[in-house]
Image: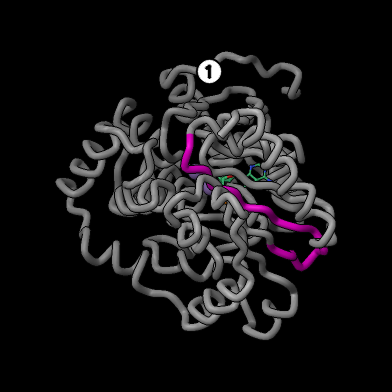
């Protein structure tokens, strides 16, 4: 089906269940530079489908990041093969726009007859043939928990652990306002199903390479605070990335350090990427400042309180443009 067939309606769990039931071969894909929710969602649904006897491939444009290699079943995550896969169904997970799946991943999935799109980004334009977008869910992993339990699909240990990591990492360890009673109830159920809380949290959060702390030191040296104290930002340039031999995942979550400054409503992280583009990460602490809307001005997207952009460089041109858009938004609101 073509993208023009996509509707603004969500599919029901039953409709999604029918597609999963009727078909035998699947490719599950998540966004470039995958985070815990991206890889966790692939493993969660992937291992449930495998336990249901399906043929499943899990691919990601950038492969498995080192910080998530501890996850049970993580070796199943592959780089996209060069030839298109013979699969009936492609499932995009945790991916706000189709291009964010990556060119190679899209090519690998190009023979799929049906596209499912399961996500929690408010900016998701529903590019699947069947869409399950719930922007009230704190993580795609929580949508999958609800789907799998509602449909009584297999729930192996890999699925249980992957859902926990997906939701824990996307909620800042169950802290962000998107965390609801449903989230805690889900976590309790996962623990009841045998999840080892201490081990999984320590593998997720107490297991950083030394270079990540060196990166923190370098970032602190670039820290800037706006005169009114509302906006904090820092930046990572090519030179530091090369000096410290950084991997893309090394900066994951560090923005929370400047987000946590008292009085700061907006935290911004600018990063020079290998391809010359600039990655901008934004976090808001105030519902009135919707960073997804600001990101959309530059072709990015995300959630109201956490969003990102990939834009044209150089950094010295991109940065003032984004900071000016932020100041306009703050002025509009009259803070
Ligand atoms: P990050 O700052 O990379 O952790 O991203 C924050 C949120 O915004 C995540 O949910 C991302 O999936 C989303 N996001 C980041 N970059 C983009 C982008 N270029 N386009 C759409 N969504 C994005
Ligand atoms: Mn994600
Ligand atoms: Mn997510």
In the rendered image, the quadrant that contains the C terminus is top right
x and y percentages locating residue 100 in the rendered image:
69, 45
Residue, disc 1: 10
Residue at 15 percent across and 46 percent down: it is 192
Does residue 280 belong to the magenta stretch?
A: yes
Does residue 131 belong to the magenta stretch?
A: no
Residue situated in front as seen by the camera: 14 or 181: 181
- The mark total stands at 1
| Quadrant in which residue 302 is drawn | top right
Residue situated in front as seen by the camera: 212 or 98: 212
When the figure is inspected, residue 292 is found, relative to residue 322, above or below; the finding is: above
Q: Which residues are magenta?
A: 271-286
- State the SS at label 1: loop
Q: Is residue 273 left or right of residue 65?
A: right
Residue at 49 percent across and 29 percent down: it is 135
Q: Is residue 190 left or right of residue 335?
A: left
- Look at the image and name its color scheme: one colour
Residue furthest out toward the front: 227
x and y percentages locating residue 332 in the rendered image:
66, 28
Answer whether residue 26 is visible to the viewer in this image.
no
């Amino acid at each position: 089906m073509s993208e023009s067939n996509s509707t603004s309606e969500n599919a029901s769990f039953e409709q999604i269940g029918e597609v999963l039931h009727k078909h035998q071969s699947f490719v599950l894909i998540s966004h470039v530079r995958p985070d815990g929710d991206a890889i966790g969602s692939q493993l969660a649904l992937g291992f449930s489908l495998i336990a249901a006897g399906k043929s499943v491939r899990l691919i990601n444009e950038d492969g498995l990041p080192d910080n998530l290699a501890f996850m049970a079943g993580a070796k199943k995550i592959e780089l996209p093969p060069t030839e298109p896969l013979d699969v009936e169904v492609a499932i995009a997970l945790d991916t706000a726009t189709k291009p964010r799946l990556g060119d190679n991943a899209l090519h690998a999935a190009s023979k799929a007859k049906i596209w499912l799109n399961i996500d929690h980004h408010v900016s998701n334009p529903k590019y699947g043939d069947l869409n399950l977008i719930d922007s009230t869910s704190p993580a795609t992993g929580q949508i999958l928990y609800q789907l799998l339990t509602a449909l009584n699909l297999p729930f192996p240990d890999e699925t249980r652990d992957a859902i926990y990591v997906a939701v824990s990492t996307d909620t800042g360890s169950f802290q962000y306002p998107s965390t609801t009673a449903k989230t805690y109830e889900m976590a309790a159920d996962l623990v009841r199903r045998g999840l080892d809380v201490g081990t999984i949290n320590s593998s997720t959060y107490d297991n950083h390479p030394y270079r990540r702390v060196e990166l923190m030191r370098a970032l602190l040296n670039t820290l800037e605070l706006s005169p009114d104290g509302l906006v904090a930002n820092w930046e990572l340039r090519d030179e530091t990335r090369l000096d410290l031999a950084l991997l893309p995942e090394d900066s994951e979550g560090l923005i929370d350090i400047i987000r946590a400054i008292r009085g700061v409503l907006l935290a911004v992280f600018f990063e020079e990427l290998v391809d010359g583009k600039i990655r901008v990460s934004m976090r808001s602490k105030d519902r009135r400042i919707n960073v997804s809307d600001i990101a959309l001005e530059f072709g990015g997207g995300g959630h109201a309180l956490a969003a990102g952009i990939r834009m044209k460089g150089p950094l010295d041109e991109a940065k003032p443009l984004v900071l000016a858009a932020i100041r306009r938004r703050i002025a509009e609101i009259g803070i």
